[in-house]
Image (cartoon, rainbow, N blue to C red):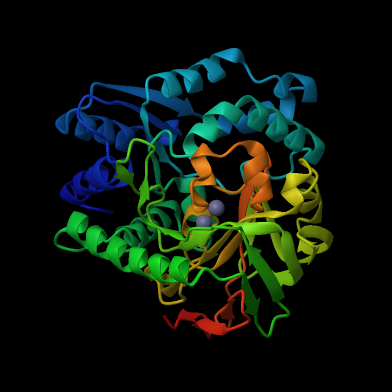
Amino acid sequence: MLTNQQMEKYAELAVRIGANMQKGQEVVIRCDVQCADFAHLIAAKAYEFGAKMVHMEWRDEKLDRINMLNASKEAISDIPEYRKAMWDYSIEHKCCLISISADDPNKFKGCDAAKLSAYEIAFQLKRQAFRNATMSNYLRWTIVSIPTPAWAQQIFPKDDVDTAMDKLWNAIGHIMRLDQKDPTEAWRKHIDTLVKRAAFLTKHNFEYVHMYNKQGTDLTVGLATDHLWIAAQEEGQDGIPFTANMPTEEVFTAPHNRKINGVVTNALPLVNNGNVIDNFRIVFKDGKVTDFSAEVGYDALKGLLSSDKGVLSLGEIALIGKNSPIAESGILFYNTLFDENASCHLAFGASYPTTVKGGNEMSQEQLVAHGMNQSIQHVDFMVGTKDIDIDGIAYDGTVTPIFRNGEWVI
Ligand code: ZN
Ligand code: ZN
């Protein structure tokens, strides 16, 4: 368990380093009802730093499961207008967004896969404008996490609830640098290191990134024309920096969605929409998935890959060294926010317009011409094994080692 003082520091990180809320701004906190105490702490902290108003978007994963089990496919896919109204309000009022991610990885276990994917598609369509506003950094946003009983017990199944919660709190405290004297300062330093690596990669302007390991991954990922590598700190469209994911260890950019070839295998299980998918293998040709298999969660993977056309290509390639505090913890979190930061990853689906020069000003056609992928999905999956090697290949064919044995060499 963290001390009260550490909890205060954590709330401050979310407000100041994460969303980087500005004086007079409105804030939307989005979280499960189980996280209410921490949400209230964040709300109080937001006012301390000059918030105009704090709104809540309460979620309730237990009710979500009850609904998924009992409501009809039609009823569950009819996303109410009032939810869209709330998202529209956030856009109109330029709210900054703070999400607390603490999902039970199995909340939809055993639910009907067709119903789940119908719901997911309807939900993403309804949320399209809002998603565009966050993915293009029109709104500043951040995601942080705290333990919940179901999540903690999934990670530490042999422990009783209290012990599991304690262990997860300790892990998160360390990963979030809350055990350091000045967490805010520690974060500023960390962000600086990542930003320098991103600048190095952007300067090299590689045509391809080649990733390979002993597990069978041998994938060439073309990079979008005029791509930008981004790390830790992004810039809102208003020019104000923010840190979207906390923790974050990644340096990422956009693949070229017609220039991806080869085979990739996963390094960690993928938890998507309340289902675990593991031991999977994806084959790409000219930017598209042409074949896939999965020993665990094949139907969930198949459901995901049938969301739309764009989900069959990639929207992100992200690099993370195996010595990051999350990777070093050796814990499998069953939560993408953490697990994606333990391992190099790719994402099925949409790319971020911010990962190409001038992307926010481009039309849909221009983005497509640059190789930027479009989809209603964006689902990260982890591919960075401890032995992964990664090279950058320049337009003239020069090869620059980026990773050796799972760690940065630049
Ligand atoms: Zn990522
Ligand atoms: Zn991602």
Q: Is residue 253 above or below residue 11?
A: below
| In-front residue for pair 392/216 | 392
Task: Give 54 or 399, whichever is nearer the viewer.
Answer: 399
Tell me residue 114's x, y (percent).
81, 37
Q: Quadrant of the C terminus?
A: bottom left
Which one is nearer the viewer's eye here, 54 or 179?
54
Residue 332 can be seen, yes or no = yes
- Name which quarter of the figure residue 93 lies in: top left
In depth, the one of 363 and 229 nearer the eye is 363
Q: Quadrant of the N terminus?
A: bottom left
Report the residue that reaches farthest toward the front: 396
Residue at the outermost right position: 291
Residue 73 spot, x, y in % from top left? 78, 25
Residue 115, position in %: x, y?
78, 33
Determine if residue 156 is in view: no
Q: Is residue 381 left or right of residue 36?
A: right
Q: Position of residue 392 (x, y in %)?
A: 56, 77
